[in-house]
């Protein structure tokens, strides 16, 4: 069997959720488990966090799966319902819904539901993705407030730049102004705001990436924040090559040896979710020692520099990311963020729990 594996640490997930709770001691915290728990496995996230205050997702199948797994806590649907037909399923499963557009209010008003829904009314605080414009927010909330289909209202927004110093100042000013005098609980914070912005915690925080032990910040690593990586992507060396000066590596011979050197071939490629655009020099660990990738990542393999790894042999363990190599450092080598790499681990990679 190909040696690539994704190991997911349940205790790291628990640690990170507790850490999020300690950042926001007066709020409840949805564990954000969209995108198959950011690639970690929805079932596994539920097993790791049986006592989470709630879960947040946006795929209807995964919300139903949460109920099948016995989750009794609130489940927030971050983008709400996409079609009016789904409202029946929302009510049956007691799913809390975000409402971000007038069309959704119209559909809700026309629905016959077996029970009223808890609604998170979403304001656009500047990101211009989802949500009512500040000037229209109050009217939307007032419309919702009188609907028999609505059980409760929470006011919600999502920040565009909570990872930057001062990045929530203007969105918070808009939110406060638009909601002045509206007496409802609020939900504002993703991971970055949960960690950095105490004044934005409100009733419910919505940490995602931090639960998985990756950083929401560009300038602050996960370890420095106190997070533990939940996923280790591991494989093994399946070949070793000795290069002479001038020899190339991989498709296009994108890397050339300047002196004689030894490289290892790892059973991991872009079809496993390792980014093809990761450049030469992206960190990787072999036998517990940090080294670098060399040459272009191919579909099923990539090459690593073994110059300083004397123990290396066929079968040597390789960590693509995890405890030794932060996923965020690999992401930097590929010009992206840890989020994207975690979510992109391919279905062909077997995943397993570790305590
Ligand atoms: C994904 C998402 C979150 C979680 O964001 P992180 O940066 O991963 O913490 C929170 N709120 C909403 C609306 C989201 O879509």
Image (spheres, rainbow, N blue to C red):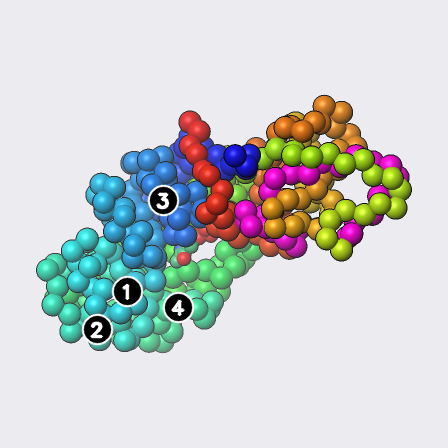
Q: Which residues are magenta?
A: 253-279
Spot occupied by residue 167 in the image (x, y as percentages of width and height): 53, 59
Observer-side mark, 3 or 1, equals 3
Q: Earlier in the sequence, mark 1 or mark 4?
A: 1
The residue carrying mark 4 is 130
- Element under disc 1: loop
The residue carrying mark 3 is 42
Observer-side mark, 4 or 2, equals 2
Q: Earlier in the sequence, mark 1 or mark 2?
A: 1
- How dense is the environment of label 1, judged by Cα within 10 Å: few (below 14), some, or many (20 and up)? many
Position of the C terminus, as image quadrant, is top left
Seen at 40% across and 46% down, the residue is 37
Give the number of the disc on residue 107. Answer: 2
The residue carrying mark 1 is 81
Spot occupied by residue 354 in the image (x, y as percentages of width and height): 44, 29
Q: Is mark 4 within 8 Å of ligand 1?
A: yes
Give the number of the disc on residue 103. Answer: none
From this view, report whether residue 74 is shown above or below residue 127: above
Observer-side mark, 3 or 2, equals 3
Seen at 33% across and 68% down, the residue is 100
- Element under disc 2: helix
């Amino acid at each position: 069997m190909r040696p690539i594996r994704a190991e997911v640490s349940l205790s790291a997930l628990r640690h990170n959720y507790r850490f999020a709770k300690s950042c926001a001691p007066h709020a409840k915290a949805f564990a954000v488990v969209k995108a198959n728990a950011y690639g970690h496995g929805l079932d596994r996230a539920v097993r790791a966090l049986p006592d989470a205050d709630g879960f947040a997702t946006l795929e209807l199948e995964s919300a139903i799966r949460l109920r099948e797994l016995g989750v009794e806590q609130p489940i927030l649907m971050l983008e709400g319902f996409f079609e009016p037909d789904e409202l029946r399923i929302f009510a049956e499963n007691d799913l809390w819904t975000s409402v971000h557009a007038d069309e959704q209010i119209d559909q809700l008003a026309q629905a016959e539901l077996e029970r009223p829904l808890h609604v998170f009314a979403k304001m656009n605080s500047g990101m211009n993705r989802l949500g009512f414009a500040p000037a229209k927010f109050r009217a939307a909330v007032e419309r919702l407030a009188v609907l028999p289909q609505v059980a409760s209202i929470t006011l919600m927004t999502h920040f565009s730049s909570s990872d930057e110093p001062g990045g929530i100042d203007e969105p918070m000013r808009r939110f406060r102004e638009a909601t002045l005098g509206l007496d409802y609980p609020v939900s504002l914070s993703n991971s970055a705001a949960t960690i950095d912005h105490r004044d934005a915690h409100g009733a419910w925080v919505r940490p995602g990436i931090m639960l998985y032990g990756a950083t929401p910040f560009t300038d602050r690593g996960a370890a420095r924040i106190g997070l533990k990586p939940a996923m280790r992507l591991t494989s093994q060396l399946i070949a070793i090559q000795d290069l002479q000066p001038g020899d190339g590596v991989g498709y296009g011979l994108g890397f050339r040896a300047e002196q004689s050197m030894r490289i290892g071939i790892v059973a991991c490629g872009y079809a496993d979710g390792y980014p093809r655009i990761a450049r030469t020099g992206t960190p990787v660990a072999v036998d517990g020692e940090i080294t670098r990738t060399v040459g272009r990542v191919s579909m099923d393999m990539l090459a690593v520099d073994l110059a300083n790894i004397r123990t290396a042999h066929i079968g040597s363990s390789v960590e693509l990311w995890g405890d030794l190599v932060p996923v965020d450092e690999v992401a930097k080598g590929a010009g992206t963020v840890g989020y994207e790499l975690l979510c992109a681990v391919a279905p062909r990679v077997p995943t397993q729990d570790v305590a």
